[in-house]
Amino acid sequence: MSGLLLRLAGPLQSWGERSAFTPVRDTAPFPTRSALIGMFAAAEGIGRGEAGLDRYQDLRLTVRVDRPGVRLVDYHTAGGGFPKNRTAATSGGSNKGAAVITRRHYLSDAVFVVAVTAADKTIERLADALARPHWAPYLGRRSCVPDEPFLLRRHVDDPEEELRTRVPLSRTAPRAQDGDDQDAGTIPVEFLLEQPPTSSPGELAPLDVIDVNDVPESFAQHSRSHTGRRLHRTQVPVPRSLAGPPQTLMQRLIDYAHLEESA
C-alpha cells in the first residue's frame, strides 16, 4: 500500500452533496468521495455512462482542511431574452421558453489536501492519469479550476502521515497566547477520516461522526446513484513549522513537491 497527495485549492470550489438539477445547487463543506472518484475517472478517460467505478472502491481518502473557505451563493441565470427555440433545452426535447434561474453555492478561498491510499499499482495508474489527464480536473464544477500545485506527490509510503507531519499548511500560524496550555509547537487542524481515528497520545478527541451519501454507484446522466459512508471528523495537532506567512506558501509547496524528484 502507498498513496498520493492532491492539493485542492482555487478561487471557488463546489462539491454538490444533495442537489442535482434543482433551483438550489448546494455544496458540501469538503470534497465528496463522489467528486473525487469522478475526477479520477475523468483523468483516466472513463465516461459518465461507462462501467468501471468498482476499480475505485478500495481507495481510502483522508482530507485535511487547511482552509474551510467562505460560503458564497451565486444568483445564476441561463437562456433568458431569446426566442423559445434558443432557450435552455428540456429532457423531453423541447425548450423552456424562459430563463433558467438557479442559486449555486460555492466555497471561496478554501484549501483541502487529500491523501489517497491504495495498492501500489492503483496509485501508479492514478498518478499517471492525474499528471496527464484525459479530461481536465475541476473542483466540483467545470468553472472551478484548481490552482497549482495540484498533484503534490505521486508516491509516498504513508500519505496520511505526510498530512500530519510534512505537507505545508496553507494558513498562517496563530500567535501563541499567554497562558495557553496548548503545546506551542503544534496547531490543531481538522481532518476527515474514513476510518475511526487512532488513540495516539498527540491526537485530539473526535469532534463528531458524519453520515454522507456520496459513494458513487453510477454517474450515468439519467440514472445516477450513490450509497452512504461514515466520516470521522477530528482535530489533529500538526507541527507549527508547516504554517508560515502567505508570501512564502508557494515556495514551500514547490520545495515540498520537488522533494520527490530529488529522492
Image (cartoon, rainbow, N blue to C red):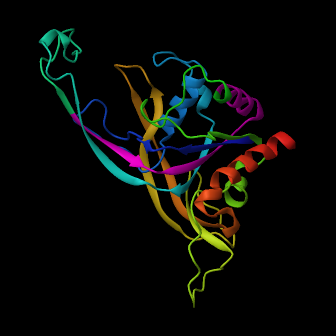
Indicate left or right for 5 with 261 as reference: left
Q: Is residue 232 above or below residue 49?
A: below
Look at the image and tell me whether residue 169 can be seen: no
Front one among 207 and 236: 236
Q: Is residue 42 above or below residue 69?
A: above
Q: Is residue 241 above or below residue 78?
A: below
Q: Give the quarter of the image for residue 19.
A: top left
Name of the residue lying farthest toward the front? 247
Front one among 3 and 259: 259
Q: Position of residue 142 (x, y in %)?
A: 43, 29
Look at the image and tell me whether residue 78 can be seen: yes
Indicate left or right for 121 with 83 as reference: right
Q: Position of residue 115 (x, y in %)?
A: 64, 46
Quadrant showing the C terminus:
top right
Is-magenta flag for residue 106? yes
Q: Is residue 56 above or below residue 157?
A: above
Q: Residue at x 46, y 19 (%)?
A: 48
Quadrant showing the N terminus:
top right
Q: Residue at x 75, y 49 (%)?
A: 255
Please give the count of numbered marks on the rendered protein: 0
Q: Residue at x 72, y 55 (%)?
A: 161
Name of the residue lying farthest toward the right? 263
Q: Position of residue 169 (x, y in %)?
A: 62, 58
Front one among 119 and 89: 89
Q: Residue at x 38, y 39 (%)?
A: 16
Name of the residue lying farthest toward the bottom? 179
- Magenta-colored span: 102-129
Q: Give the quarter of the image for residue 261.
A: top right
Q: Give the quarter of the image for residue 117.
A: top right
Is-magenta flag for residue 194? no
